[in-house]
Amino acid sequence: MNPELRGIVREELLRSIAWLGLGIVGWPILVTEVAWLDATALTVFGLPVLTWAVLTVASVGVRVLTGADASVRSSAGLSVFLVLGVLFGGVGAVYLVAVRSYSALAVTAAYVTVTAVAVLWYWYAGVPSAAEDATA
């Protein structure tokens, strides 16, 4: 394994701790809330590990194939951060409506508002240029 690939794998494994933590907390909550998903060892332990493995391999693959740095201060990092935030917000909105029986209109309005503000701020604040990254 070359040093560059080793560094990417090491960084992504450290970042994947968050994916594993979310999987360990999130999947059991989902299993207890959804009637059609049985609480077995496979669903409670296997799904978090599978989620962690897929997301970690995917993030290593994206970094190796694109050569992009996953720093949030870079253009690619900010874009990924924005897209993941919108996706997680959407999953949360669906959960609130489907499982917790919140008002679909209120949740949708809040989701659209927060997403629009985030996208507008991203557009307004802009992406740091390479010259700004070098001086920071």
Image: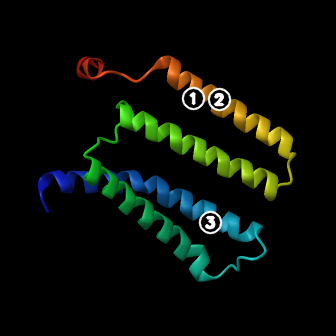
Q: Position of residue 62 (x, y in %)?
A: 33, 53
To which quarter of the image does residue 111 belong?
Answer: top right
Residue 47 vertical position relative to residue 6 in the rendered view, above or below = below
Residue carrying label 2: 116
Looking at the image, is 98 positioned above or below residue 70? below
Q: Amino acid at mark 2?
A: Ala
Tell me residue 32's x, y (percent). 74, 70
Amino acid bearing label 1: Val
Q: Is residue 85 above or below residue 5?
A: above
Q: CA distance from mark 1 to mark 2?
A: 5 Å
Name the secondary structure under disc 3. Answer: helix
- Residue on which the image places disc 1: 119
Front-lying residue, 131 or 43 = 131
Q: Distance of mark 2 from mark 3, alpha carbons?
A: 29 Å
Around disc 2, counting alpha carbons within 10 Å, would you say few (fewer than 14), some (14 to 19), or many (20 or more)?
A: few
Q: Pointer 1 and pointer 2: residues touching (CB < 8 Å)?
A: yes
- Give the side of residue 101 with respect to residue 26, left or right: right
Disc 3 crowd, CA 10 A, few/some/many (<14, 14-19, 20+): some
Q: Earlier in the sequence, mark 1 or mark 3?
A: 3
Height in image: 22 above or below 125? below
Q: Residue at x 64, y 44 (%)?
A: 89
The amino acid marked with disc number 3 is Trp
Number of numbered tags placed on the structure image: 3
Of mark 2 and mark 3, the one earlier in the sequence is 3
Decide: marks 2, 3 in contact (CB < 8 A)?
no
Q: Residue at x 84, y 38 (%)?
A: 106
**Residue lying farthest to the left in this orientation:** 2
* Residue 96, numbered label: none
Q: Are marks 1 and 3 in contact (CB under 8 Å)?
A: no
Checking the image for residue 27, the label placed there is: 3
Mark 1: which secondary structure?
A: helix
Separation of residues labelled 1 and 3 (CA atoms): 29 Å
